[in-house]
């Protein structure tokens, strides 16, 4: 079974530029998450989708971050404009929408460096 | 809100020695508990999880963890480590029950370094 795919793997931009990340979850997984992992810390949830609807975006900095999941499959996360503090690894994860406590499967992440 | 504390940021241990990585959590409601491992430049991989039932949970790669409700702990153990166990380990919680899957709240991680 194919895992969660993410691209690009690495991205370097200058502050105030925009950037977009792409995620393709495991086939059949209705729930999709975006996490931000700053160096030396654990991942922190940015947004959770159930199919193509947003379940939780309370920790998403909406003045600069946006995310969508069209057709309930692939998802994109965008930052515009980027700040230095956005340097982090952005992880996408997916899970089934069955019983609670379903395992979340993570992609390899996109490492963003903002100069 | 839930929170997770991993008491050790770094744990060095000699090969074939036992290891325990400590995790404590705080929550006013019932939670599920998870341990994930992250190898360099890779995503997180599930080692084991506790949802209910037996408090001793066995996972992949010879790891196990014990849920202790009174001490709000979920420590990870392995009786004999290998060089290949060198990685970052994350403890996480999510709410149990409710209307669907809830996101994970992670600790800051413990870097396990196995020394030959």
Image: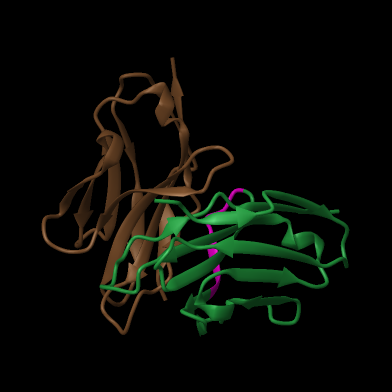
Rendering quarter of residue B67: bottom left
**A63 left or right of B98?**
right
In the rendered view, how is the structure colored? by chain
Quadrant including the N terminus of chain B: bottom left
Q: Residue placed farthest to the top in the image?
A: B116
Q: Which chain is green?
A: A
Q: Which residues are magenta?
A: A40-47
Q: Give the colour in which the image draws chain B.
A: brown
Instruction: Indicate the position of residue B99 as horizontal and vertical percent values.
Output: 31, 84
Q: Is residue A38 visible?
A: no
- Total labels drawn: 0
Instruction: Please state which of residues B54 and A75 is positioned toward the viewer in this rendering.
Output: A75
Is residue A53 rendered to the left or right of residue B31?
right
Towards the viewer: B43 or B29: B43
Instruction: Work out whether B5 lies above or below B38.
Output: below
In this view of the protein, can residue B71 be seen by the observer?
yes
Give me the residue at 76% from left, 52% from top. Answer: A11
Would you say residue A44 sits in the magenta stretch? yes
State which quarter of the image contains the C terminus of chain B.
Answer: top left
Is A92 displayed left or right of A2 in the figure? Answer: right
Residue at 26% from the left image edge and 78% from the top image edge: B97
User: Which residue sits furthest left?
Assistant: B54
Q: Residue B8 at x, y = what percent? A: 44, 43
Q: Nearer the viewer, residue A91 or B105?
A: A91
Magenta stretch holds residue B74:
no
Q: Is residue A110 above or below residue A56?
A: above
Residue, x 27% and y 25% (percent of image)? B80
Q: What percent of the width, then of the height, locates residue A101?
A: 29, 67
């Amino acid at each position: 079974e194919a895992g969660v795919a993410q691209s690009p793997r690495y991205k370097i931009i200058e502050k105030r530029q925009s950037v977009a990340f792409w995620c393709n979850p495991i086939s059949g997984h209705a729930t999709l998450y975006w996490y931000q992992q700053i160096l030396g810390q654990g991942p922190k949830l940015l947004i959770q989708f159930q199919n193509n609807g947003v379940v939780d975006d309370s920790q998403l900095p909406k003045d600069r971050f946006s995310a969508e999941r069209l057709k309930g499959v692939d998802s994109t996360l965008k930052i515009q404009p980027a700040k230095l503090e956005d340097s982090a690894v952005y992880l996408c994860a997916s899970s089934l929408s069955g019983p609670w406590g379903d395992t979340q499967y993570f992609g390899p992440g996109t490492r963003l460096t903002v100069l | 809100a839930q929170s997770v504390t991993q008491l050790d940021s770094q744990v060095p241990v000699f090969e074939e020695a036992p290891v325990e990585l400590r995790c404590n959590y705080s929550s006013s409601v019932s939670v599920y508990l998870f341990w994930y491992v992250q190898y360099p430049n890779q995503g997180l991989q599930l080692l084991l999880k506790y949802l209910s039932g037996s408090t001793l949970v066995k996972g992949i790669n010879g790891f196990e963890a014990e849920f202790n409700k009174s001490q709000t702990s979920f420590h990870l153990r392995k009786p004999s480590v290998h060089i290949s166990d060198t990685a970052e380990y994350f403890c996480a919680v999510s709410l149990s029950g409710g209307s669907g899957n809830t996101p994970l709240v992670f600790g800051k991680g413990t870097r396990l370094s196995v020394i030959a």
